[in-house]
Image (cartoon, helix red, strand yellow):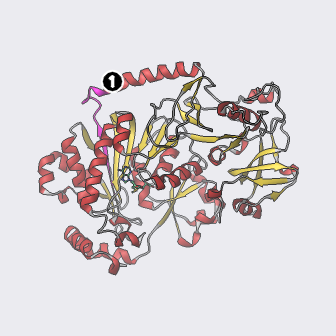
Amino acid sequence: MNETLPAAFLDKMKGLLLEEYEQFVNSYNFPRAYGLRINPLKLDAGKWHELLPMGKHSQPIPWSSDGFYYSEEDRPGTHPYYNAGLYYIQEPSAMLPVELLDVRPGHRVLDLCAAPGGKSVQIGGRLLGRGVLVSNDNAYERTKPLAKNIAMAGIRNAIVLNEEPERLAAVFPLWFDRILVDAPCSGEGMFRKDESMAASWERHSVERCSAMQRDILIHAAAMLAPGGQMLYSTCTFSPEENEEQIASFLAANRDFSVVPLHPVSGLQPGRPDWIGEAAAKLAGKDVTDSLKGAVRVWPHHTAGEGHFAVLLTRHAEASKCGENLQNERSRENLDDVSRAREPKQAFTDKPGSLRSAAGGRAKATMQNSTRKQGAGYPESPMSRNSRKSRDGQSHGATSGERVDPIAAWEYFCRENLLLDAAEDEVAEAFQDKVFFRYRGLPSLEGLKVIRGGWLLGEAKKQRFIPSQPLSMGLKAEQAARSVCWSCQDDRVSRFLRGETLFIEPEELLLQGGVSAKGYVLVCVDGFPLGWGKYVDGMLKNELAAGWRRI
Ligand SMILES: C[S@@+](CC[C@H](N)C(=O)[O-])C[C@H]1O[C@@H](n2cnc3c(N)ncnc32)[C@H](O)[C@@H]1O
């Protein structure tokens, strides 16, 4: 491998690492480490060892509370539990930044450079459904896998944006409790994992990357609430993109400082001694020294690729803005209460933005008790007289009539689910699609919104079509109809390949007196995989093309 490493890179590392250099360069002759992280929204990490044969021999990753090493031949990506979102395959050192960020349920968190979403999924797991994750990437084509990974993990409280940091800063000033800047970088730490990174190293020059990072950091800082924390990370070794970048940032932002981290097993401290003279002088000795509190992952010290992470905080007392933010928050809370009381609906005809409008309903919930008591079914969204079925398919609208998406969702929900909106969730429509979104969000008008929240489904031709993200965010027992197969049952892989299956009605688990006909949540060992539609012994496959195994 070291023959493929750029000569200029090796020279630079030799000059930095001195006597450690041989050990460093030798590490490229060893195979890379593989890691996966258990999704706490679906599984307790303690149960991992019982779940799969590989769980029995996999070792914990020392700096991660739910990460494990696996061997290449284990191929966890081919198991149906992967499709059920029980774990995320992630390079071990990439698990570190979120581990250090101290995300707690209820926080407002921004993942600014998020695609393909490994760290967003990790943050979503930490939030446990409370608070909100704003997950952004400025590369449109990368936001698709990002949205899919978030959905597969069953994360309800995330929105996905495709924006430049500057435009976000105008919408979210001082708004976030936690920000992750997992910056685009020259990728020197990924040469062993991905040889193409070594080949494109000159193109992603250190100077070009550090200019991008500087710009991203300025706008990220504008969004952090006083007292909040921001984690900056890269997967590169170059000091210009790491310690020196942060020293320059701190020189210009005196209300920020480093929160010292304490390296565990094999992790190494930051290297302020590598900061260039000009940047060190500008920042001053205290600031420069504080960068010892950053953390570096080295491939010759640990089983993981190269990474850098530093945790920063904005002092609460240093800014008058802090008070403003508190006032702002109290106002929002009051607004939330009044909004919840006042019926509200959002429609837009214009793609790319969300808009709220008066009318419609604020919330789409189904009280379990309503169902159990067999209380009246709701009015159809279009016609009060023409409801035909209890399978959530026909709403009786005559052709040409526009279905109210929120009402269609409510109807579907009552007929097919045992689901309540969380306190901070509100059902909102975007064209024909319906989402649960976080109540406290500012207006996203004008922003490129890829996902405005948890996508519940779409009102189409007088029907409500439940979405794949809805199925992935449910628990098996929240569906009125479900079927559950063991991971050894070959119907699981046939379902994942998109086949229609024939099943006996007795195999369906029915709740609340529903008939067998209708949407069925298909599960593997109790974990949802997607929707099927049951009619006369046939389970029609409703997995969307992008979710099928080829
Ligand atoms: C290191 S990758 C992020 C990996 C991701 N955090 C994960 O764990 O899956 C950096 C990302 O930054 C994005 N990016 C580059 N410039 C950006 C900018 N100005 N604003 C937002 N994202 C940017 C890139 O498209 C890329 O997806």
Where is 443 relative to 327, above or below?
below
Percent position of residue 380, x then y? 76, 29
Where is 393 relative to 323, above or below?
below
Whether residue 405 is visible here, answered yes or no, is: yes
- Image-quarter location of ligand 1: bottom left
Q: Answer with the quarter of the image where residue 38 lies.
A: bottom right
Q: Left of 474 or right of it: where is 156? A: left
Question: In the rendered view of the protein, which quadrant contains the C terminus?
Answer: bottom right
Q: Left of 210 or right of it: where is 352? A: right
Residue 543 shown in magenta: no
Helix, strand or loop status at disc 1:
helix
Q: Magenta residues?
A: 308-321
Q: Left of 544 or right of it: where is 222? A: left
Where is 214 relative to 81, above or below?
above
Question: In the rendered view of the protein, which quadrant contains the N terminus?
Answer: bottom left
Where is 472 relative to 437, above or below?
below
Percent position of residue 377, x then y? 79, 27
Give, as a three-letter code, the residue at label 1. Answer: Asn
Name which residue lies at 21% across and 54% down.
244
Name which residue lies at 63% across and 40% down.
456
Q: Residues within 10 Å of mark 1 (few under 14, many from 20)?
A: few
Name which residue lies at 75% across and 38% down.
416
Residue 309 shown in magenta: yes
Percent position of residue 537, x then y? 87, 53
Q: Answer with the quarter of the image where residue 489 lies.
A: bottom right
Which residue occupies the foreground of this view, 15 or 215? 215
State the residue position of label 1. Answer: 324
